C-alpha cells in the first residue's frame, strides 16, 4: 500500500487539494503498477507561523 504524505503551507482551496490527490494517485498507479484503491494520500496543512524559511516564519515573509 503506497502512502504519500504531503506537507504544505495552509491556504490552498479544497478543489486544488482534490486535484492533487487525484493526480498523485494517478501517477503512483502508473509508475508502480498498483491498484488505485491501495494508494493513500495524506495532506497536512501547516500554519504559516509554524513553517520556517531562513530563520523566520513564512507568515513573517508574507508567503
Image: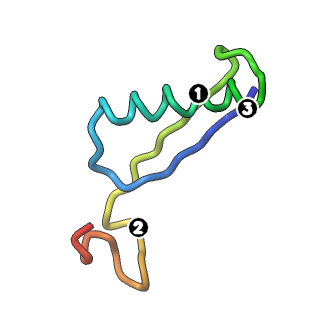
In-image side of 57 versus 44 (left or right): left
Q: Secondary structure at mark 2?
A: loop
Quarter assignment of residue 34: top right
Residue appearing at x 77%, y 23% in the figure: 33
Q: How is the image coloured?
A: rainbow
Q: Nearer the viewer, mark 2 or mark 1?
A: 1
Residue on which the image places disc 1: 25
Decide which of 23, 11 is in the foreground and name it: 23
Give the Cα distance between marks 3 and 2.
Answer: 31 Å
Asked if residue 18 is positioned above or below residue 58 in the image, the reply reads above
State which quarter of the image contains the C terminus: bottom left
In-image side of 41 versus 56 (left or right): right
Asked if residue 46 is positioned above or below residue 39 in the image, the reply reads below
Q: Secondary structure at mark 1?
A: helix
Q: Nearer the viewer, mark 3 or mark 2?
A: 3
Q: Secondary structure at mark 3?
A: helix
**Residue 18 horizontal/vertical position (percent):** 39, 28
**Residue 32 horizontal/vertical position (percent):** 77, 30
Give the Cα distance between marks 1 and 3.
Answer: 10 Å
Decide which of 23, 51 is in the foreground and name it: 23
In the rendering, which numbered label is found on residue 51? Answer: 2
Q: Nearer the viewer, mark 1 or mark 3?
A: 3
State which quarter of the image contains the N terminus: top right
**Residue 14 horizontal/vertical position (percent):** 30, 32
In the rendering, which numbered label is found on residue 57? Answer: none
Residue appearing at x 62%, y 39% in the figure: 4
**Residue 19 horizontal/vertical position (percent):** 40, 30
Residue on which the image places disc 3: 31
Whichever of callouts 2 and 1 sits on the residue coming sooner in the sequence is 1
Question: How crowded is the residue under tag 1: few (<14 C-alpha within 10 Å), some, or many (20+)?
Answer: many
Amino acid at each position: 500500500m503506497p502512502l504519500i504524505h504531503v506537507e504544505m503551507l495552509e491556504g490552498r482551496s479544497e478543489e486544488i487539494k482534490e486535484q492533487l490527490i487525484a493526480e498523485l494517485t494517478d501517477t503512483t498507479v502508473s509508475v508502480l503498477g498498483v491498484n488505485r484503491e491501495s494508494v493513500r494520500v495524506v495532506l497536512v496543512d501547516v500554519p504559516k507561523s509554524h513553517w520556517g524559511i531562513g530563520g523566520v516564519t513564512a507568515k513573517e515573509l508574507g508567503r
